[in-house]
Image: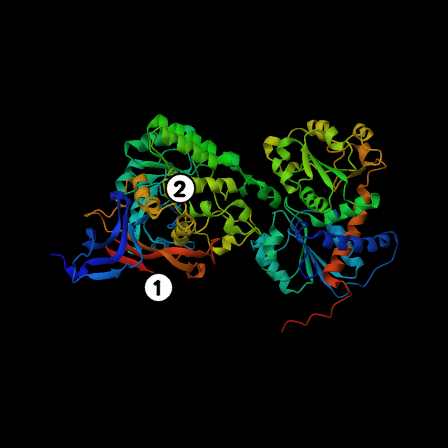
């Protein structure tokens, strides 16, 4: 018999679980790492308690796009440090992109990541396998073996598949295992040498541009290939208005096409880049004002399926360089929810229910994870957040090993309060 | 601008630019005299750090500093710790620790001096950063134009060539439009993105030489930077010269008092014909000469200040 003293009762909160159409004041009882009951005034006299007054109790957040850097670049991040940062951002699960060193293109490496995460990470880490061996874009990786070892999707993120025929084969093959193909849509010939979005700011700074087209031709290609192969295709960090329009159209045609948008792409734009600050350098780049507006529109109207961080740690030694030498990417776990609440919910664009869809229910569905729900019997991954708490992001307090963010010093309204993974409180905000 | 360095024209006001030009006017007559070395910057040390090859700009800066009596140290990227893998910021911190009064710097990366200026106290003078800015070039160009015209306002300036990769074009766009000049840009479309029109409502584009030159007061030719271009663009020198090279026939259709400028180094037969280079209204060598006066003015205003010299800095303890 399970000991009731190990139960957890989350009290006095407002439960929002779009997976079962729930939005009501209720308690959540967790037993044996699973959801035991959801309802008002649950009796649980001996259990551990978590007071969620004024807070939202939601199914645990799933980040579809993160770089944990282990193995190979542990000076930037590890599965442990990245996991802690994710927990502090309210995420209970993260998908680890395969562009580590070596690339995760084998069952052995997938095992390593899963085992390391089980021992060291407070949150679930679901590995994404490479599409091609070494992400070199030449031969398909052993996708089936990686699937058996635990990958939940495939992607050559960061080194996108340029060969359309290889991508066609990848989609076709992955569909046999029910795996979603995630593509970082970038035509590397069109973007070659580019440092920031190809707009007036790039011209003014004398930096080579990354055109919107370099993303859009690949989104178009992949949608066509998905239609041909029947594969589930997910656009990683979608950033342009026309990309979004193509996804909208594909969805209208009933194709299994989904997309994610990052907090930085709905918050910032190329005009915000100043003083050649490399904390504003990422791929895809911060786009134009119109593109950012389109991202907000897509988040509001349902075209965008998920918010994903593209958490991409780089050590200061690499970011403190000339803009064109610095690597692309910013950390994002700890600011994602705050930015979404502040900009999207308090900005009047989306409801709290929609926010929970974007962070939890939808991302779980995109890759077919059995998460993103508070149904009785489900794994008790829970995110508790306060939509009103005002706080200021201080990157020097970050759990990440890296400090590359443009959001240091941002004052935000709303943020995470507690992160619960399989019934255990793995992070709690300081009172 | 005292103490701030000179990173780019974009950051300067028209008043600040005017002060530099006025001071340059003061130094202009000095160029034709001999044996006239001033002591305005005596005891000051200026480091010239060039990460990109340069003949005229580097020599011009050094002569300007020496004529003002400053001590100069010159460093090329080759043969320094740069080759040993030291980061740019570490190199600059090391040089700054030797307490120069200013660092004149050229770098192949756009924004390199702006990046450094966020961390360094020592004023930095940008002698060209990537495809971004070349502020002293625009200043000497303005001085040269003003040798031939009473004011910049209302002038029509044609800038012709590889606009996309030109820091000279960008600095000139900022300067000329701040003073109310009209700029028409001309070049092959891949080297002339439409975003250039966003610099100012006074900037237009054309892909035809004849159109650019018509009614122009100033015809500013740019060097073709084959080394910066995408390999797909490199059409033959002959093809380029035929459609975008400046020839005498163009000048016959231009205003009779139009002047021809070029920041150098010129490629005869590529962006302008040999006859044009030696044309009476070509002011290319005047530009070089004015470069010294302008750089003296910049160093003077930056380091000696205006009104005259401030007290010595107290040495750091």
Kindly identify which numbered label has been placed on residue B78.
Answer: none
Of callouts 2 and 1, the N-terminal one: 2
Residue extending farthest to the left is: A1
**Please, which chain is the residue tagged with disc 1 on?**
A
In the image, B220 versus A69, the foreground residue is B220
Q: Position of residue B266 (x, y in %)?
A: 75, 38
Q: Position of residue A258 (x, y in %)?
A: 36, 36
Q: Is residue A133 left or right of residue A24?
A: right
Mark 2–mark 1 distance (CA, rounded to whole Å): 32 Å
Q: Residues within 10 Å of mark 2 (few under 14, many from 20)?
A: some
Q: Are marks 2 and 1 in contact (CB under 8 Å)?
A: no
Q: Nearer the viewer, mark 2 or mark 1?
A: 2
Q: Position of residue A218 (x, y in %)?
A: 45, 33
Can residue A274 be seen at all in this image of the molecule? yes
Residue B213 quadrant: top right
User: Dividing the image into 4 quarters, which one contains the N terminus of chain B?
Assistant: bottom right
Kindly identify which numbered label has been placed on residue A430.
Answer: 1
Residue occupying image coordinates x 80% and y 49%: B290
In the image, A385 versus A365, the foreground residue is A385
In the image, A258 versus A85, the foreground residue is A258
Please, what secondary structure does the residue beneath circle 2 have? helix
> Circle 2 is placed at which residue position?
A300
Color scheme of the displayed model: rainbow
């Amino acid at each position: 018999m399970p000991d009731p003293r190990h139960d957890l009762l989350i009290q006095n909160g407002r439960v929002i679980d779009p997976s079962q159409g729930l939005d009501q004041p209720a308690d959540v009882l967790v037993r044996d790492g699973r959801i035991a009951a959801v309802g008002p005034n649950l009796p649980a006299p001996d259990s551990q308690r978590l007071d969620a007054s004024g807070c939202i109790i939601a199914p645990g957040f799933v980040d579809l796009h993160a770089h944990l850097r282990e193995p190979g670049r542990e000076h930037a991040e590890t599965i442990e440090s990245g996991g802690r940062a994710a927990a502090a951002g309210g995420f209970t699960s993260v998908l680890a992109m395969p562009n580590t060193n070596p690339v995760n293109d084998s069952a052995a490496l997938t095992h390593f990541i899963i085992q390391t995460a089980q021992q060291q990470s407070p949150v679930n880490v679901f590995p994404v396998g490479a599409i091609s061996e070494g992400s070199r874009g030449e031969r398909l990786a052993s996708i089936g073996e990686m699937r058996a070892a635990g990958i939940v999707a495939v992607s050559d993120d960061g080194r996108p598949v340029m060969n359309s025929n290889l991508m066609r084969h990848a989609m076709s093959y992955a569909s046999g295992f029910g795996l979603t193909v995630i593509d970082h849509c970038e035509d590397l010939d069109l973007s070659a040498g580019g440092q920031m979005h190809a707009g007036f700011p790039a011209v003014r700074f004398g930096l080579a541009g990354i055109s919107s087209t370099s993303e859009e031709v690949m989104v178009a290609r992949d949608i066509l290939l998905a239609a041909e192969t029947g594969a589930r295709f997910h656009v990683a960090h979608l950033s342009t208005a026309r990309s979004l329009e193509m996804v909208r159209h594909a969805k209208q045609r009933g194709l299994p096409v989904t997309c994610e948008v990052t907090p930085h792409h709905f918050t910032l734009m190329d005009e915000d880049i100043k003083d050649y600050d490399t904390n504003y350098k990422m791929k895809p780049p911060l786009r134009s004002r119109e593109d950012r507006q389109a991202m907000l529109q897509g988040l509001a109207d349902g075209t965008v399926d998920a918010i994903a961080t593209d958490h991409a740690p780089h050590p200061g030694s690499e970011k403190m360089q000339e803009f064109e030498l610095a690597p692309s990417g910013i950390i994002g776990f700890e600011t994602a929810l705050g930015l979404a609440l502040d900009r999207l919910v308090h900005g009047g664009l989306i409801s709290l229910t929609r926010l929970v869809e974007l962070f939890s229910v939808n991302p779980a569905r995109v890759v077919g994870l059995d998460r993103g729900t508070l149904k009785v019997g489900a794994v008790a991954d829970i995110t508790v957040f306060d939509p009103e708490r005002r706080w200021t992001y201080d990157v020097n307090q970050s759990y990440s090993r890296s400090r590359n963010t443009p959001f240091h010093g941002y004052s935000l309204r709303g943020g995470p309060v507690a992160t619960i993974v399989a019934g255990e409180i793995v992070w709690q905000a300081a009172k | 601008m005292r103490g701030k360095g000179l990173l780019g024209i974009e950051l300067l006001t028209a008043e600040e630019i005017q002060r530099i030009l006025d001071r340059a006017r003061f130094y202009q007559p000095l160029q034709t005299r001999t044996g006239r070395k001033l002591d305005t910057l005596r005891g000051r040390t200026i480091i010239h750090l060039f990460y990109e090859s340069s003949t005229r700009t580097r020599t011009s800066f050094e002569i300007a500093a020496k004529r003002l009596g400053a001590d100069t140290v010159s460093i090329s990227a080759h043969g320094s710790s740069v080759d040993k893998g030291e980061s740019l910021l570490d190199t600059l911190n090391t040089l700054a620790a030797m307490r120069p009064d200013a660092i004149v710097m050229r770098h192949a990366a756009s924004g390199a001096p702006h990046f450094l200026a966020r961390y360094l106290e020592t004023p930095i003078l940008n002698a060209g950063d990537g495809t971004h800015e070349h502020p002293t070039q625009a200043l000497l160009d303005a001085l040269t134009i003003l040798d031939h015209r009473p004011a910049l306002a209302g002038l029509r300036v044609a800038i012709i060539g590889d606009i996309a990769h030109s820091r000279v074009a960008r600095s000139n766009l900022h300067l000329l439009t701040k003073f109310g000049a009209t700029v028409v840009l001309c070049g092959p479309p891949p080297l002339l993105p439409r975003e250039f029109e966003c610099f100012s409502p006074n900037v237009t584009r054309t892909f035809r030489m004849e159109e650019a030159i018509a009614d122009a007061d100033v015809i500013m030719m740019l060097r073709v930077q084959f080394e910066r271009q995408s390999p797909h663009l490199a059409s033959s020198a002959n093809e380029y010269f035929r459609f975008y090279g400046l020839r005498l026939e163009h000048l016959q259709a231009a205003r009779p008092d139009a002047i021809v400028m070029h920041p150098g180094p010129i490629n005869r037969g590529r962006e302008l014909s040999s006859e044009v280079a030696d044309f009476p209204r070509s002011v290319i060598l005047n530009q070089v000469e004015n470069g010294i006066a302008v750089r003296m003015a910049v160093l003077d205003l930056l380091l000696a200040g205006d009104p005259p010299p401030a007290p010595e800095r107290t040495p750091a303890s």
